[in-house]
Every structure is written in structure tokens, then in C-alpha cells.
Image (spheres, rainbow, N blue to C red):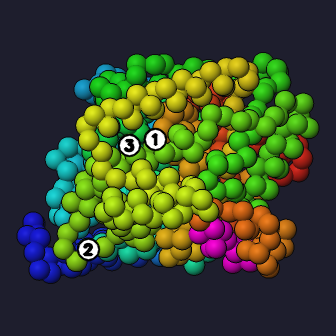
Amino acid sequence: MLFSFSGYAHQRACLWKQKERQSQIDSLPAIYSTPLSLSEEKIHALSISQLVSRCRSGAIAPSAVMMAYAKKTLVAQHATNCVTDIMFDESLSIPSVANWGPGVDSETQVTEAGTHDHSLLGVPVSIKDTVDIVGHDTTIGYSRNVARPASASSAIVRLLQDAGALVHVKTTVPTGLLALETTSDIFGRTTNPYNPNHTAGASTGGGGALVAYGGSKIEIGTDVGGSVRIPAHFCGIWSLKGSAGRFPMWGSSSSMMGLEGVPIVASPLAGNLVDLEEFWKRVVLSEPWRYDHTCVPMPWKFVNLQVEGRKLKWGIMWEDGVIPPSPACRRALTMVASALRKQGHEVVDFHPPNVFEGLKIAYQLLFADGGKQVASQLSPREAFGVSTSSILDLLNLSRFVKKVLAFFTRSSDPISAEIYDIMHAKTIVEDRKLIAARDEYRARWHQKWTEDGLDFVLTVPHVLPALENGTSKQATLLSAGYTCIFSLLDYTAGVLPVTFVDKIVDALPKDFASTPQGKSLNGVAKGAFSVYDAEKMHGLPLGVQVAGRRLEEEKVLEGMKLIEAALREQGTVFVPQVRM
């Protein structure tokens, strides 16, 4: 079915897609709406390696796994509105799963990419609604993509299905992806699993909420400036953004197809670190370059920093030069730094090359077309979320008006003035100069990192905990600088949850705006801090971000394990508090 996009076609497309989703839910047998049985609870508690082992031995049927996770998925959907497409039965019909039976452990399956040993048999994996699955829409949050099913599956989906994974659901995204909240006219708003008044983050917000609720073992998301890392931080789960070429990306769509200045990468999210590492390892051991020509043929490296026993050097990047972290987010980072020091590691303040200079390069590369590509896919009557609209409104202002604004704000708010100066469409020559500037900036980071002898850089994933719904206009996309900078650098970066917001400990002074610190904030930072409310945010998760250099996925995962071990020794263990 195709919709001609004129008049009320947008509303018709949205209504059609919503009815399709509801029909999928309504057609499910009543058993899917019942609580998990004791045996299903036990299945749900298994790790990825345990699930695969027991499915391969015949001790557990993939259909039993699917039933447990399907029930959790429906609970998550009811609570957060995180699902776009349901494929419970379809996940069981692929050959690697349909041919399941006792003894499958000794069998191998021949596929177009070689042989497989069912290395992900029975593992439920959800897919962001930017990744192609044959026969299903890839909307990217735009109504014009409704009822236009993909003709072929993406590289990662084919790899997963060959390995026996249960690809059972697609998850919500914001319109056009470039947002801090997951909301669209097609599917509505996805809310935070800890508090429905707050966002799950974006653009992999649906996947973040689903994983937090236990509806999936793994979510396949995409990240260009924090789109898996910010939802992980907001939802209290784990993620690892790899460098370009390390994880299969071919067959994933974007609102900015062709963008290369800031790499767009596919990345997984998980409900715990053990599963995150196991999944990364099993995907790489499946030789993804056989499925995706853009993947680097780089085998999995077995790194164990704990066995090596050496003490590591961790650099703390406290601020990005635009918006300082809120008290809650800074406290989580401080907790990690303190725990690592008590373990004997060297923890130092890291002063990288000017971060704002790098972010200016990133913003100009992301919007070198003046935002036209993102806006051109919008249908009549369709709306972007508030943070996307704000950046597009800025881009659409005339150069003259922006020069005037920059002139009058330069002395009092130089950060805002520079943003006014640079946010406009670029010529091809200007874009190439930005690429050259990016490469020179990357070289400066490499030199500084090497000179300081760092193993990792630690920082916050975002300046705020999960935003209250509708407040991302004040926070702006510029608040994502702590994740965006590592996308520009193409560094590996992981996020892990540490603690929760405390309304007393993390509160700002009541007269914060009139304090010296409040007055010293630039306009962008004042907007972000205007929506920080520790009382409203009480109980929301707080994460930290761990960065390594390019293609250091295995090392960063080890660094994340060291952080968890250090926190555990101090009596701090993150225990999810999602109300099921």
C-alpha cells in the first residue's frame, strides 16, 4: 500500500501504521498477556551464553524463550510505547530456529556467508526502526516510509538469523532521528522505563526502554552523536559504540544517508555488561565482513586487563567547554573516579584539545546541507520533535539575522555567538575544509592521548539525567556534546549505569540562577540547567561514559568491567529498579 503525500495522507499513513501495530498485538493468543510462569522467569534470568548452550543442547526450546520475552515485550510496550512492529512467530520460522531439536549443538548450517554453529541460538534481539528487515517497514520516524516494506534484510539481521537469534520486534525512533526525545506522529511518545514523565532518550529510545524492561536481550541501534549511549544513560542499561567498520551497518537507513564527516555506526545495547560483551564477541567471531563489505576484517581480540594486573591510567574529562555536567551526573563520574583510585589506578584530570572547537566541526559537518536532507523527508502536516525543530529553525534563519545575533551576543555569550556564526549551509569546498579540520583535530587528540599515556578517558554521557518530556528544546541538541565528540573522533565509547539521582544530594541551590556559578553559564548551558530538577528526576539512572581509541572495542569492554569491579568493592552495585 502506498500513500500519495498530499492533503491528509500523513494522518492516514500514521493511523494505518498504528492500526497495523495494534492488530498485531490484538491477534496474539491470550497467554501472551499472562504473567511469566516460574519456568519462564528462570529462562528470562539466563545469560546469552547460558541461553545458547541450553537451546543448542535441547534443554530449552527457542519457542519457550520467545514466549518469556514476548510477555516482557508487551509489558514494556504498555508501559513505555516502545515497539513499532511485532514478529514473535516470524522469529521462530527462520531455518536456523525452525529446524531446532535436541542435538543441534553438533550440527552446522551452511549459508551464503559460510558455516554457522548457531552461536546466537535462542537469543532475543530487537531492531531499531532504521534497520532493514525484509517485508517490514523501515520508517526512520517518517510517515512517507509507512507501507513500504524493505525488499531485503540488512547485514546484521541476516547474520543474526543465520546464527539462530530471535529477531522478534522493531523499536521506536523519533522523526528524523536527530533528537533527544523519542517521539513521532506515527507512534507517539516513548517514555522512560523509570518514570513516564521523562524521556527514554533518542534516537534509540524505543530499544533502550525495551531492554530496560527485559523485553529483549539485545537491541541493535545506531549512533551518530550519542543515539545509543544517551538512551543507555537515561534508561539504566549498557551500550558500546564501536568505531566505523567494526560492527555491521550495511542495510541500515538514516535521515542523513551519505553522511561521512561524522560516522554513523550500528551498535548494541544490553541489560548487563556480561551480555553486551558476549554479544559483541559472538558477532565478530561470526565474521561480519562476510555479510557487510564495509566491515573491517578484524578478528576478535581476547583482552584481559584484570589478569594482566597492571594499574591503568584514566583521564577524567570533567567538562566539554559548553555545558558543565549537572550535579547528579558529576556525582556519578566522581564515584567512578574515587573507586578506581582506591583500586590503585592512576586517575588524572584530562585536558584534551579544545572540545568546543571539535564540536563546532562536528555540528557543521552534520548540518553542512543546512538541514535540507532531514527536512525534505517530512510530509505535509508532519512535525519534528522540539529539539529537531529548534536546530532547523536556527539553520533556516538568514545569514544576516544570525550575524546580527552573533554581534550582539559575542561579549556576553561567546558560545552562542559562535553557534550563530557557523550554523549555515556549506559549499562543497567549505565541507572539504571541514573534513581536513576534522582530521587535524583527530591528530591533536591522538598526540595528547599518547603524551598523557592514557588507557581510557572517562566522562559523563550527557549533562543531565533523563529529561522531562517536552523539555529538550531548552536542553538543545548541543547538550549531547559529551557523546558527539567521540563520534567525531571515531573512538570506541561505552556507557554503563552507576547509580540513581538523589533529590537531596543532587539538588541545585534554590537561588542557583543568581549564584556566581549560575550567572557564569553561557546561554546554551542556562537552557540546559533550566530543566534540571533533582526532585522530579529522583530515582532516574545515572551512567558514565568510557572512551578508548579507534577500534579498541575489546579494551573498552574490559575497562567497563574494571569499573564495575571497583564500584563493587566500594559497595556500589547498580541494581535496575524498573517496575515490571
Q: Label 1: which residue?
A: 361
Q: Main secondary structure of the magenta part?
A: loop
The mark that comes first in sequence, 2 or 3, is 3
Residue 552 in the image: x percent, y percent?
58, 26
Is residue 48 positioned above or below 514 on the image? above
Q: Residue at point 82% right, 50% down?
A: 335
Marks 2, 3: nearer the viewer: 3
Q: Is residue 122 left or right of residue 538?
A: left
Q: Residue at point 41% right, 67% down?
A: 390
Q: Secondary structure at mark 2?
A: loop
Q: Secondary structure at mark 3?
A: helix
**Do we see residue 380 in this rendering?**
yes
Is residue 541 positioned above or below 498 on the image? below
- Is 267 part of what is drawn in magenta? no
Residue 536 in the image: x percent, y percent?
69, 78
Magenta region: 525-539
Q: Amino acid at mark 3?
A: Leu
Q: Can you tell which mark lies on residue 365?
A: 3
Picture quadrant of residue 70 = bottom left
Q: Label 2: which residue?
A: 382
Q: Amino acid at mark 2?
A: Glu
500 vs 524, nearest the viewer: 524
Q: Residue at point 22% right, 77% down?
A: 381
Picture quadrant of residue 465 = bottom right
- Give the class, few, some or many, for how many residues have Cα within 10 Å of label 1's Cα (few <14, many ≥20): many
108 vs 525, nearest the viewer: 525
Residue 86 in the image: x percent, y percent?
34, 63
Q: Amino acid at mark 1?
A: Ile
Q: Are marks 1 and 3 in contact (CB under 8 Å)?
A: yes
Q: Secondary structure at mark 1?
A: helix
Viewport quadrant of the N terminus: bottom left
